[in-house]
Structures are given as C-alpha cells and as structure tokens.
Image (cartoon, grey):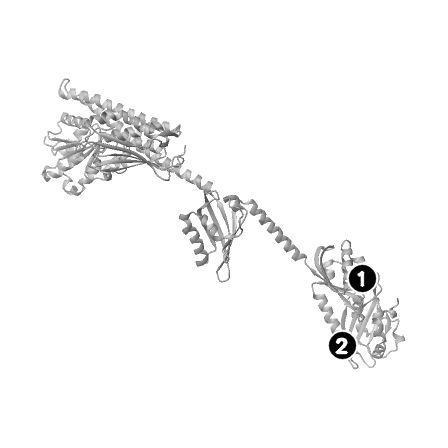
C-alpha cells in the first residue's frame, strides 16, 4: 500500500481547506494538500521529493529535524514554528503525527496551521484537542492503548501511551504498528484474544483481571476493553485501559499473609483471645477459650453476660463492674485484672486477663480485644511458695526462741550447781547449810538433766517431722486411749471428763501426735484445776460444711490472764502459774504437733473461769503443708 | 551490816544459794526474799520511802511478772529511788541482748551472771558503803 492510498489521510489530502503534508520517516515530503501549496505559495511539484527542513526557513532546520524523528518514532509532537515567505516569515502551529500503514509507522503526517491570514478554526480546534489528548494520555498512569480490528481475528496496536512503556518496559516504537500476537506472550495471549473477540462480537466492554510477566516484573492489572463502532455499527477499533493492580494485589497478599499469621498465632497461643463488641455487648472467642476452660462452641459470639456469670461471685463486682466502669466512665484503653473463673467442669481457674479498648473519636468504647491467660499453676506455685516461706519463717523464729530458751533454762540449774559447789567449799561440813547445799547441788543437777531430756524430746519431735506422712487417724479411739493414761490423776482429784467425738471421724495426721495432744491438754487441765469447784473437762470435735474440723478441749479450772500471757502461751518453758510446778513444755509440744499436721491452735482463758483450747484443721490445710 | 536487801527470784534453789553466798561475805543481816516480782513490788511500794531497800537482786526469767516488767512498774517512782535503791540484775542468761536492754534502765546498777561470786559481792559492798579505804575511790 502506498502512502497516497493510506485511507486515514486521503480525505485530508484531498480537502481544499486543510494544510496537510505527508512525510517519509526521514522527513522527505511525499504528499501535500492544495491548502498547503497555497500557504507556502509554491506548486506541489516543487515541494515533493524535498526534505521538509529544506523548505522551512534556515533557522528552523536544526529544531524541526529531531521533532520529525520523534514523530516517526511514534510520538505526537506539536510545536510553534515559522513558515517561509513570500511575502515574509509567518508564525504557524504544526502537529506531527506518526502515520501508520500496514503494520508499521510509514511516515509522518504534518498538519500546519498558519497564525496569519486564512486561519481555520477547525484546524486550531483539532490541534488543541490533539495536544490536550496527548498530554492527558501521557500523564495518566493507567496503560491506555488503541487496537485496530483487522480481519481473521488480528489486532494491531495503533496507539499506546507512555504508561504502557513505563509499566511493561516495552518500547513504544516496537509496540505501535505491531500485532498483538507479536507483543503479548502466551499464556496471556490466548486469554486476551478471546476477550477481544468477545468485545468485538458483543459490542460491549469486557473487563477482567490478569497477571503477566513483563521486563519490569510480574504485573497484575484490571483490563477494560471498550469497542469503538463505526457509522455502520461495525466494531473497527478497541480501546484498552489497564489499571495496574500490582501494588493493591501486594497489599492484599500482605494482608492475607498477616491474617494467616494472626490465625496461626491464635492457634499457637494458650490464651483465650476475645473481641468484645461493646454496642452488641457480645464476646467473640478464639479457640483458646474452649481449650482452656472447656466451654464448647454453643454460640460465638456469645452475650457478654455469659462470661460475667463464670467469674467468681465474690470477685464479680471488682472484675465485671470494674471493666464496665473503665470502658464507659473513663478514657483509659488498657485493662487488666487477675481473678478466678469457673471452668466448664466446675473447677476454678486463676486468670490473668488483659484487654485493649478501642474508642471512637468521642472516646466512647467500641470494641475491646483481649486475652485471658490461665495462671492457675503459677498462682498455686506462688501459694505453695508463700506457705513454705511462712512455715520456714515460723520455724526459724521458733528455732531462735528455742535456742534462747534452752540456753537460758540449761544455764539456770547449771549456775545453781556451780554456786552450790562454791558454797560447799566454804561452809563447815556437817552444818545445816552444808547439808542443804549438797541436796540442792543434786537437785540442780537433776534439773539440768531434765532440761537435756526435754531438749532431746523436742529435737526428736522435729526430726520425726521430716519423715512424716499423713494417715487417717480415728480421733475418738486415740482420745480414749490418751485419757486412759490420765484417768488415775483425774479420779484422784474427783474430776469428770466428757468427750463427744463422732466414732467415724478421721483426720489426716499422725496417731502419736494426736495422742500427745490429748494427753498434754487434759494433763494441763488437771494440773491447773480450781480448788473452788469440781473439775469438769469437755472434749468435742465437730466438722462443718466445708469439711473443716474443730476440736475443743475445755475446762472450768483456774484459767490465766490471756492478755498478760500474750504470744508466750505456746512457747517452750513459759509458765503462767507460779505456785504449780511445770516445765512449760506441754503446750509447746501441742502446738508443734498440731502445726506439723497442717492445723492451727488457739486458746481462750479467763482467770477463775477456765480455759478452752481450739484445734482447727481445714479440709485441705493438710495439703498445703510442704513436705 | 544493816544494808536492806531484796532477793527476787522464783527459783527457790537460787534464792537459797544467793542468800547463803551473801551471808558468807557478811553482806547484810537484813535480807528479804521474794518468790515473785509482784510480791516484791507490793512490799516495796507498801512500805514508806525510808524503808526502800538499798540493794535489790532481781532475776529476769519469772512467770507472771518478769524482771523487766518489775522495772517498768517501778518507773513512776524512779526519781525517788535513784541514788537510794540500787538494783542488780542477777540472771542465769548469758544473752548480750539482756545486757543491752539493762542499760536502758537508770535504776539498774549492774548485771551479774549467776552464780554471784565473792568478788562481785565485795565490789557492791565497796560501792554502796560510804567510808574510808581504797574502795571509796571507785564508788
């Protein structure tokens, strides 16, 4: 096909009004329109075969040559230039457009608009529009291209903007004029050809997303193909716009990955994650909730009140009330609490709960995202540690007390013995003082021996605790046996003893300890009886609803001043009656035995009225005693 | 020797021993013994000012009222007793804490570990009995 046959330019070239010329890619003038010959005042045959730059004024030559080359490379170029006379140089506006013939740029199409006389509004409007379109197409970031629809399902690029080159990395000179099947690689090619065919057949826009590999990398785009119809309703051209979705796809992919990681994190964590929708007042639970607390997936989200129901009633006000207060009445965003929470099986878990409150621009709560952590094991370990420290502390202070008391009580008879030995050397043998001193020396030495025996007893009690293992002890039987031993003393003073201990009551502990406890308490009651009334001793044991057992040993004896005695009641070698002999070891042993079995002992007494000892064993107190 | 002396100790053996040791040194022919601090306190406060003992030997470890409680009970009468009544703590305890604590009481003239020996008895005599002789120099 020759240039003169080019259908797109023919009507312009024959037009009497348009100043148009057709150049070869090198800038050689091939055709001119009549209006142009008039504009240049030169007949057409003197122009044909010359280079445009030769026809123009010399000053224009250097400037225009590269512009023509750019147009020949596929660009639309507009510039303001000069036209040669006669009669004189005049200003003009020139548009250089690539001229497509067959599958390549065959030349350049130049449209000239004189600034002088004979300016045609249509030319000017066309030029301005061209310029605007050029600017628009080159400045939009979406890939834009135009395809000519040719027979046998072939499509040729007739236009593509800079974004096309920038995005795909394909040079426009290579693209424009080329067939689609030479530019787009498989497998995309088959896809786009089907889509083009559909647009041509249906005369309707076709939209799809595709991912293709280009020199600049993999691109994902949304492609819109719009058919352009001619007067006959035939589809002659397709306009394509590709919106680059690569970034958006990347963000979506990142988001998907991030969500996936979050899902795995939820699976991996041992926490129960939740999302409190404040408006709906519902909680959406992560998988950990069922895993930790055993509540099956009945409904998710579930009403907020469901959760609140499982909080320990005694802590509900602090925890649930506190959370609602913080959410509604403050602008704080971080909430945390430790509380007890009922598991599905009815047992209680210690929970550490942390939440982040999301608020709207007015500070009102919208959601709270949080996590419940089961810290039961930690709490139990802490509790064991605390009990152990408490016990060690107690033992240590007992030990200090013991050391002090023993040294004191050991030294008292020793000091006497030393003194009497000294005195014996100084008084006359056979005198009263000598005889008495000798007796006293013996007495002092016996006392010394007694203290050493006590020390041995106390130490052996302590030693036995090391290998102590609890066994169920039938309390009534042990009490009965212990009382047998003190019965002669009781009869001798005319006292009476009543005891009410359920036959089936069994306490975890050690039989020998209970025996010693009953023996010491009853012996004490007999020893410190009142002379004013017959002695009555009552022993009873009761168990309350929680399984805690209290043993009471009560007498109507002389009693003592509890306030004056203070903490010293159960200490070694403390006595509260000056006229009755006693070593002050009995109550110390009672206390030691009770505590080694996880119990507590307390005393109430009133001078002249009587004394009551209370031994308290909680149902699980025993388990709390570390070995 | 008319130095009025109180001996307060719940340990009867110790009371007997101390009394004999004092007699052996001719410390006093006016020794009053008390088995409890309460009893001693009542006697001391019941008698007139002039009848207050010049020397008190006080045990610490006693039931109902121990030596410290006895001293605390005397506190209101401190002004009157200071310079007239010298209290010596006589204890079998070797605990340093007791010595420290005794220094807080102005009425306490000294702390002696049981058994009291003749040297300690003579030192007290020298300090309390006015008269010529080298003993007066360190009174």
The answer to whether residue A507 is left or right of residue B34 is right
* Closer to the camera in the image, A314 or B124: A314
Q: Residue at x 49, y 52 (%)?
A: A355
Provide residue A439's location: percent of width, then percent of height.
19, 21
Badge 2 marks a residue whose secondary structure is helix
The answer to whether residue A87 is left or right of residue A355 is right
Check the image and name the residue furthest to the right.
Answer: A45
Q: Height in image: B136 above or below A309?
A: above
Provide residue B98's location: percent of width, then percent of height.
25, 35
Which label is found at residue A155?
A: 1
**Visible in this render: residue A570?**
yes
* Label 2 sits on residue: A124
Q: Residues within 10 Å of mark 2 (few under 14, many from 20)?
A: some
Chain under callout 1: A
* Closer to the camera in the image, A507 or A132: A507
Q: Residue at x 29, y 24 (%)?
A: A453
- In which quarter of the view is residue B93 placed? top left
Provide residue A292's location: percent of width, then percent of height.
51, 44
Mark 2 vs mark 1: in front: 1
Chain under callout 2: A
Count of numbered circles in the view: 2
CA distance for labels 2 and 1: 32 Å
Check the image and name the residue furthest to the front.
Answer: A503
- In which quarter of the view is residue A110 placed? bottom right
Badge 1 marks a residue whose secondary structure is strand
* Closer to the camera in the image, A408 or A16: A16
Which label is found at residue A60?
A: none
Q: Residue at x 15, y 37 (%)?
A: B41
The answer to whether residue A200 is left or right of residue A623 is right
* Closer to the camera in the image, A337 or B128: A337
Q: Height in image: A614 above or below A60?
A: above
């Amino acid at each position: 096909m020759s240039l003169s046959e080019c259908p797109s330019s023919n009507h312009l070239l024959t037009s009497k009004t348009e100043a148009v010329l057709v150049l070869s890619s090198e800038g050689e003038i091939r055709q001119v329109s009549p209006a142009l010959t008039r504009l240049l005042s030169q007949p057409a045959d003197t122009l044909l075969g010359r280079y445009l730059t030769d026809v123009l004024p010399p000053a224009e030559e250097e400037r225009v040559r590269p512009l023509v080359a750019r147009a020949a490379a596929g660009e639309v170029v507009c510039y303001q230039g000069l036209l040669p006379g006669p009669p004189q140089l005049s200003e003009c506006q020139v548009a250089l457009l690539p001229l497509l013939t067959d599958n390549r740029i065959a030349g350049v199409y130049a449209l000239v608009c004189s600034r002088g006389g004979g300016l045609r509004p249509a030319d000017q409007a066309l030029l301005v529009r061209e310029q605007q379109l050029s600017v628009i197409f080159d400045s939009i970031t979406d890939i834009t291209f135009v395809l000519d629809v040719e027979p046998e399902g072939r499509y040729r690029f007739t236009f593509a903007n800079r974004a096309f080159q920038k995005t795909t990395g394909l040079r426009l000179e290579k693209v424009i004029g080329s067939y689609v099947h030479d530019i787009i690689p498989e497998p995309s090619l088959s896809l786009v050809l089907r889509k083009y065919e559909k647009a041509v057949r249906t005369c309707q826009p076709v939209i799809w997303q595709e991912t293709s590999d280009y020199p600049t990398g993999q691109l994902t785009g949304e492609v819109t193909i719009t058919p352009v119809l001619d007067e006959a309703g035939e589809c002659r051209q397709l306009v394509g716009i590709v919106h680059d979705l690569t970034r958006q796809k990347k963000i979506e992919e990142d988001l998907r990955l991030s969500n996936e990681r979050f899902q795995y994190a939820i699976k991996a964590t041992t926490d129960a994650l939740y999302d409190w929708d404040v408006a709906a007042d519902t909680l959406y639970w992560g998988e950990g909730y069922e895993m930790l607390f055993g509540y099956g997936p009945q409904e998710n989200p579930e009403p907020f009140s469901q959760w609140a129901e499982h909080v320990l009633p005694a802590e509900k006000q602090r925890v649930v009330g506190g959370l609602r207060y913080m959410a509604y009445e403050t602008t704080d965003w971080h909430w945390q609490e430790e509380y007890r929470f009922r598991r599905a099986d009815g047992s209680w878990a210690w929970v550490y709960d942390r939440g982040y409150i999301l608020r709207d621009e007015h500070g009102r709560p919208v959601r709270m995202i949080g996590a419940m952590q089961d810290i039961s094991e930690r709490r139990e370990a802490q509790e064991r540690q605390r009990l152990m420290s408490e016990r060690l502390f107690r033992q240590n202070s007992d030990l200090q007390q013991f050391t002090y008391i023993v040294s004191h009580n050991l030294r008292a008879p020793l000091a006497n013995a030393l003194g009497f030995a000294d005195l014996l050397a100084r008084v006359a043998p056979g005198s009263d003082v000598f005889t008495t001193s000798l007796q006293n020396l013996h007495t002092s030495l016996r006392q010394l021996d007694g203290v050493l025996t006590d020390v041995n007893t106390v130490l052996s009690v302590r030693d036995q605790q090391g290998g102590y293992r609890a066994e169920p002890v039938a309390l009534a039987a042990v009490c009965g046996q212990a009382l047998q031993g003190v019965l002669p003393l009781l009869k001798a003073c005319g006292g009476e003893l009543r005891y009410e201990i359920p036959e089936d009551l069994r306490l975890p502990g050690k039989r020998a300890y209970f025996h010693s406890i009953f023996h010491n308490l009853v012996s004490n009651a007999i020893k410190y009886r009142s002379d004013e009334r017959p002695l009555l001793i009552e022993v009873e044991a009761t168990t309350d609803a929680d399984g805690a057992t209290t043993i009471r040993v009560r007498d109507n004896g002389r009693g003592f001043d509890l306030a004056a005695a203070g903490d010293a009641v159960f200490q070694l070698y403390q006595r509260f009656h000056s006229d009755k002999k006693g070593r002050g070891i009995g109550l110390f042993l009672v206390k030691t035995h009770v505590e080694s079995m996880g119990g507590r002992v307390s005393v109430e007494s009133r001078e002249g009225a009587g004394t009551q000892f209370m031994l308290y064993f909680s149902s699980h107190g025993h388990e709390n005693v570390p070995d | 020797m008319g130095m009025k002396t109180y001996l307060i100790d719940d340990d009867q053996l110790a009371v007997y021993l101390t009394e004999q040791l004092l007699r052996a040194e001719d410390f006093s022919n006016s020794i009053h013994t008390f088995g409890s601090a309460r009893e001693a306190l009542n006697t001391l406060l019941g008698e007139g000012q002039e009848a207050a003992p010049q020397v008190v030997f006080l045990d610490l470890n006693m039931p109902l009222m121990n030596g410290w409680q006895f001293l605390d009970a005397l506190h209101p009468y401190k002004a009157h007793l200071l310079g007239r009544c010298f209290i010596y703590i006589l204890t079998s305890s070797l605990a340093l804490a007791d010595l420290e604590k005794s220094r807080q009481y102005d009425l306490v003239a000294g702390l002696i570990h049981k058994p009291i020996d003749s040297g300690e008895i003579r030192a007290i005599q020298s300090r309390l009995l006015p008269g010529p002789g080298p003993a007066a120099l360190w009174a």
